[in-house]
Image: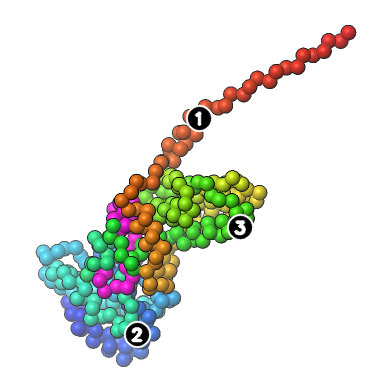
Amino acid sequence: MIVDLPNTTISKVSKSLVTIREQGGAVALGRVLTLIIATDFKGIERAIKAANDASREHPCRILVLADDKGGSKKAARLDAQIRVGGDAGASEVIVLRAYGEAASDPQGLVTGLLLPDAPVVAWWPDGAPEKASVSPIGRIATRRITDAASQADPHAYLRHLAKTYAPGDSDFAWTRLTLWRAQLAAILDQPPFDPVLAVEVTGAVDSPSTDLLAAWLELKLKVKVKLIRTARGKAVSGIRGVKLIRKSGDIEIVRNVPDVATLIQPTQPTREITLPRRSLRDCLSEDLRRLDPDDLFGKVITKSFGPKTPRPVISEAAVTKKASSAKPVAKKPVAKKPVAKKK
């Protein structure tokens, strides 16, 4: 069921929720948290779809706060929409479209609609605030989720996040690494337990997850990691592969097609493994499973992207050129044995 409330107030929205609950039996007593989504008008439906899917694992009240970015030029107005039942997954969705001066106080708009005694999670699926932890919405949230891949310069945003990080901050660029980190950890738990001497991580030029994976491997393995950037492909984006260099032989995970990667290990047959690119629903569901700070993410982002010498980055074209320009090793002429003459 969808109820539209044009040109309304937060008080009227709250009363409408009570009426819907009494008449239709839609209750909020089983909700475990309040999820606030801050986006623009274009991102509303995409964000709601991901949140509705995630709500089946985490029943919650979803508050979508959308700003038309029109500033004070337009007349102040607040349009609201309430979605319950089949249109809201296992949640109840309240969409707030703020115009003009009505958008100047986002915290005031959502405060009256928060579930009592329930944690608050804030998610910015598109543009992130300058500093999430002190932003109007971030101040009332237990967890604050951004997405570096949605920023104008994903790599610069990671460096910015390292400067502004506060416990409780999270980013989908890190959440997308869960399957990769689990796979790499499982491989290194198998014999032979040779130390890793060096690591190469290859990924698309616009992939912040590639940067974070390289930073995590460098932090955990205490080795230098070479980061190789590739052009963004139509078929495969994000991380393309990881090579672990050891004395007993190199281990490689290469993903040349979507969702499937090839695992190459010494003394073992080459095999394919499932390694899909995670959806918004998958990332959001994982981040909602824990409401305490992610200490590992905090350590990786602050130690690896802080004010220090940046990790060397090379392009795939440079690697290919270097390999092709290498001079072949000259073979030594083999001395011919004298042929014995017949008497």
Q: Position of residue 290 (x, y in %)?
A: 41, 72
Mark 1: few/some/many CA within 10 Å (<14, 14-19, 20+): few
Cα distance between the residues tagged 1 and 3: 35 Å
Q: Position of residue 230 (x, y in %)?
A: 42, 44
From the viewer's perspective, is residue 37 above or below residue 215? below
Residue 236 in view (yes/no): no
Which circle's residue, 1 or 3, is located before the other in the chain? 3
Q: Quadrant of residue 47?
A: bottom left
Q: Look at 37% across and 50% down and name the residue there.
A: 206
What residue is pinned by disc 3?
Answer: 190
Placement of the C terminus among the 4 image quadrants: top right
Q: Look at 17% across and 77% down and name the residue there.
A: 7
Q: Name the mark on residue 28.
A: 2
Which circle's residue, 2 or 3, is located before the other in the chain? 2
Tell me: 66 left or right of 183.
left
> Which residue type does callout 2 highlight?
Ala
Q: Nearer the viewer, mark 2 or mark 1?
A: 1
> Which residue type does callout 3 highlight?
Gln
Residue 111 in view (yes/no): yes
From the viewer's perspective, is residue 119 above or below residue 38? below
What residue is pinned by disc 1?
Answer: 326
Which residue is outermost to the top?
A: 343
Q: Nearer the viewer, residue 141 or 96?
A: 141
Q: Quadrant of residue 273?
A: bottom right
Residue range highlighted in magenta: 137-162
Q: Are circles 1 and 3 on residues that touch, CB within 8 Å?
A: no
Secondary structure category for the residue under label 1: loop
